[in-house]
C-alpha cells in the first residue's frame, strides 16, 4: 500500500500521526520555493503541526525551481509525506512518525509559471518561504518578464510585482518573505537584490514604496538535521513498521529551531509559531546564530581533526568513546561557551550546549567526520578565531582543548590516505614539506592573511599547539586525547 489521501483510512499502524480530513480543505496561504528535505522537515513541519492544532489553518504551494528531482512523487501522494523524528531529548529516546499534510500541491516554475503568478491574486496568500541553497540568493542579470525568470530573486520579484498590480498596491496585500538559505542576514541580502532588480527593470516608484513599506523580508536561521531518506535497511524496516510505502519519507532529529527576525506584524501573520517553541520570532536573532555557530559548528570544527585522526568515522561513534565525549563536553561547555563573542548568559549557552551534546549522540544520524573537515581552514577562521580572541580577553593562559583542536587541524592538513578538501590544502602540503613541526606551527599561527590576526602573539598558545602536535605525531591521537581529558579544566 502506498501513501496517498485515498489510503489514509487503511493505515492502522500504532505510533503514526495521521491528518484529519478537514485539513485538506484549508486555504493556500504560503508560497514555498524549494522541495528539499530541510523545508519539509522544518518550516513545513511547523505549519503542519499548527494546522493540526487549529492555529494557522493554511496550506503550502511549493514551487519547484530546478529540473532536478521528481515532483511526481508529490502528485502521486497528494502532497503527503512521512517525517520520522528520531533522537534523544533530555536523555530520553524520542520516536515519532508524522504524516504531514501541509503541502497542497507542487508547481513547476518551468512548465507552470503562469499558474504560479495566478497565486499572487489569492488574498489568502501572505507568506513566501525559500530554500534555494546559498547560491540562490545572488544578483544575476535577469528579466522578470521571462517565463519564468532565471534566478530565484527574479522569480520572487515577478511574483511580488504581479501581487502589487493585482491588489492596486494595497497595504494589506504586502507579503512576509522568510528565506532559510544558510547565509548571514539572508532576508536583508535578498531584499537588497530584489530592490536592485526592480530598479534595473525600471518598475514604478510606487511599487518600490509598496515593496519597502508593506513587504517584510525577514532574516532567519534554521537549525535541524534532516538527513532525508534513510539507508535501504532502515527504510525497509520503517516501511514494515508503518505498513505503507512512501517515496518522500524523511528522517529528522528531534531538535528544531527556526529563528525569524520580525516585529509584531510578522508575528501576527506567522501565527503557526504558537504551535511549537522551536519557532522564535524576535527583533534580534543574533544570539541564536552565535549559539549555533560557536557551540555546534565551532565544536564540530575543533573536534573533527581529533576524531578523524583517532580513527572515528561518525560523530555518534566518537561520542560512544568516553575520552572523546569528555573532550567534546569540556571543549564546548568550559572553553567555548564562556568565550562566545556576544552577550550570551552563560546558563543559556550551557543549556544550548547540552542539547547539542544530545544531538551528537543521536544514533539515527550518521554524520561523517571527513565531511565536517571540508573547508577546514575557513571554518576555523569564522567559527573559532573570534572565540579564541575573546578567551584571551578573559584569561592569560591558552585554552587547552582549543590548542589540541588546532594541532589536530595542522596534522590533518598534512594529508595522506584521505582527501583534504580545503582551499588552503596545497599551501599546507608545501609547508609540511619545508618545515619542522615547530616551524610549521609558527608559520601557520603567525599567518594574519589566514586568520585575520597573529596567533603567535597570544600568550602560550603557540607552545601549547606545538606540544599537542608533537604528541599527536609521536604518541598518536588516541593517547593524546586520553591524556588531554585527564586534565581538569576549571575555567
Image: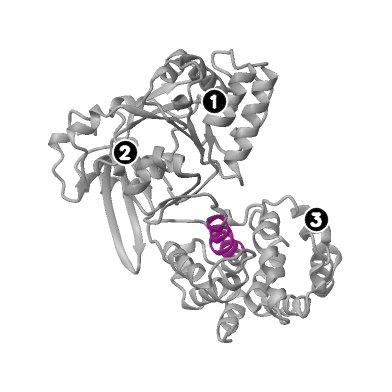
Q: In this rendering, which labeled residue sits more in front, label 2 or label 3?
A: 2
Name the secondary structure under disc 3: helix
Please provide percent x and percent y for residue 444.
80, 65
The residues tagged by marks 3 and 1 sit, at their Cα atoms, a distance apart of: 41 Å
Q: Secondary structure at mark 2?
A: loop
Dot 1: element: helix
Using residue 93 as the reference point, say whether residue 338 is left or right of it. Answer: right
Q: Quadrant of residue 86?
A: bottom left
Structural distance between the alpha carbons of marks 2 and 3: 53 Å
Tell me if residue 228 comes above or below residue 61 in the rendering. Answer: below
**Residue 324: x %, y % from top left:** 52, 74
Whether residue 229 appears in this view of the structure is: no
Quarter of the image for the N terminus: give it.
top left
Frontmost residue, 329 versus 434: 329
Q: Earlier along the polypeptide chain: callout 2 or callout 3?
A: 2
| Residue drawn at x 28%, y 27% as measured from the top left | 78
Give 33 or 253, whichever is nearer the viewer.
Answer: 33
> Which residue is tagged 3?
427
Return the disc, 2 or 1, that comes first in the chain's sequence. Answer: 2
Q: Position of residue 278 (x, y in %)?
A: 40, 53
Q: Looking at the image, which is closer to me, 489 or 55? A: 55
Q: Residue under circle 2?
A: 56
Q: Are marks 3 and 1 in contact (CB under 8 Å)?
A: no
Amino acid at each position: 500500500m502506498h501513501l496517498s489521501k485515498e489510503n489514509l483510512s487503511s493505515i492502522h499502524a500504532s505510533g503514526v500521526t495521521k491528518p484529519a480530513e478537514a485539513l485538506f480543505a484549508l486555504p493556500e496561504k504560503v508560497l514555498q520555493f524549494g522541495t528539499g528535505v530541510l523545508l519539509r522537515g522544518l518550516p513545513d513541519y511547523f505549519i503542519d503541526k499548527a494546522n493540526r492544532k487549529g492555529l494557522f489553518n493554511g496550506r503550502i504551494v511549493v514551487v519547484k525551481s530546478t529540473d532536478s528531482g521528481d515532483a511526481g512523487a508529490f502528485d502521486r501522494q497528494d502532497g503527503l509525506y512521512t517525517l520520522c523524528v528520531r533522537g534523544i531529548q533530555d536523555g530520553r529516546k524520542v520516536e515519532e512518525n508524522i504524516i504531514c499534510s501541509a503541502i497542497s500541491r507542487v508547481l513547476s516554475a518551468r512548465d507552470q509559471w503562469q499558474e504560479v503568478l495566478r497565486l499572487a491574486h489569492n488574498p489568502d496568500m501572505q507568506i513566501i518561504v525559500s530554500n534555494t541553497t546559498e547560491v540562490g540568493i545572488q544578483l544575476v542579470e535577469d528579466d522578470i518578464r521571462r517565463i519564468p525568470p532565471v534566478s530565484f530573486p527574479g522569480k520572487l520579484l515577478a511574483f511580488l510585482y504581479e501581487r502589487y498590480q493585482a491588489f492596486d498596491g494595497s497595504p494589506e496585500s504586502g507579503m512576509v518573505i522568510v528565506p532559510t538559505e544558510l547565509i548571514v542576514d539572508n532576508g536583508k541580502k535578498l531584499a537588497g537584490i530584489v530592490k536592485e532588480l526592480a530598479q534595473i527593470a525600471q518598475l514604478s516608484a510606487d511599487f518600490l514604496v509598496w515593496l519597502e513599506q508593506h513587504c517584510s523580508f525577514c532574516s532567519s536561521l534554521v537549525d535541524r538535521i534532516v538527513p532525508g531518506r534513510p539507508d535501504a535497511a532502515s527504510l525497509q524496516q520503517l516501511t514494515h513498521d508503518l505498513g505503507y510505502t512512501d517515496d518522500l519519507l524523511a528522517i529528522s532529529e528531534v531538535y528544531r529551531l527556526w529563528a525569524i527576525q520580525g516585529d509584531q506584524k510578522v508575528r501576527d501573520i506567522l501565527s503557526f509559531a504558537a504551535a511549537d517553541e522551536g519557532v522564535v520570532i524576535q527583533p534580534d536573532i543574533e544570539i541564536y546564530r552565535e549559539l549555533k555557530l560557536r557551540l555546534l559548528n565551532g565544536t564540530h570544527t575543533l573536534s573533527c581533526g581529533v576524531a578523524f585522526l583517532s580513527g572515528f568515522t561518525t560523530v555518534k561513534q566518537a561520542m560512544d568513546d568516553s575520552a572523546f565525549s569528555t573532550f567534546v563536553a569540556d571543549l564546548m561547555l568550559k572553553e567555548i561557551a564562556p568565550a562566545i563573542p556576544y552577550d550570551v548568559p552563560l546558563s543559556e549557552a550551557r543549556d544550548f550546549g547540552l542539547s547539542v551534546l544530545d544531538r551528537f549522540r543521536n544514533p539515527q544520524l550518521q554524520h561523517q567526520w571527513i565531511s565536517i573537515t571540508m573547508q577546514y581552514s575557513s571554518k576555523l577562521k569564522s567559527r573559532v578565531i573570534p572565540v579564541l580572541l575573546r578567551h584571551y580577553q578573559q584569561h592569560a593562559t591558552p585554552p587547552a582543548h582549543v590548542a589540541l583542536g588546532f594541532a589536530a587541524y595542522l596534522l590533518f592538513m598534512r594529508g595522506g590516505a584521505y582527501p583534504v578538501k580545503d582551499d588552503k590544502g596545497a599551501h599546507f602540503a608545501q609547508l609540511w614539506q619545508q618545515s619542522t613541526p615547530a616551524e610549521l606551527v609558527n608559520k601557520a599561527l603567525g599567518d594574519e592573511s589566514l586568520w585575520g590576526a597573529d596567533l603567535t602573539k597570544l600568550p602560550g598558545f603557540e607552545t601549547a599547539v606545538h606540544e599537542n602536535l608533537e604528541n599527536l605525531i609521536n604518541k598518536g591521537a588516541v593517547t593524546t586525547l586520553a591524556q588531554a581529558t585527564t586534565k581538569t579544566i576549571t575555567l
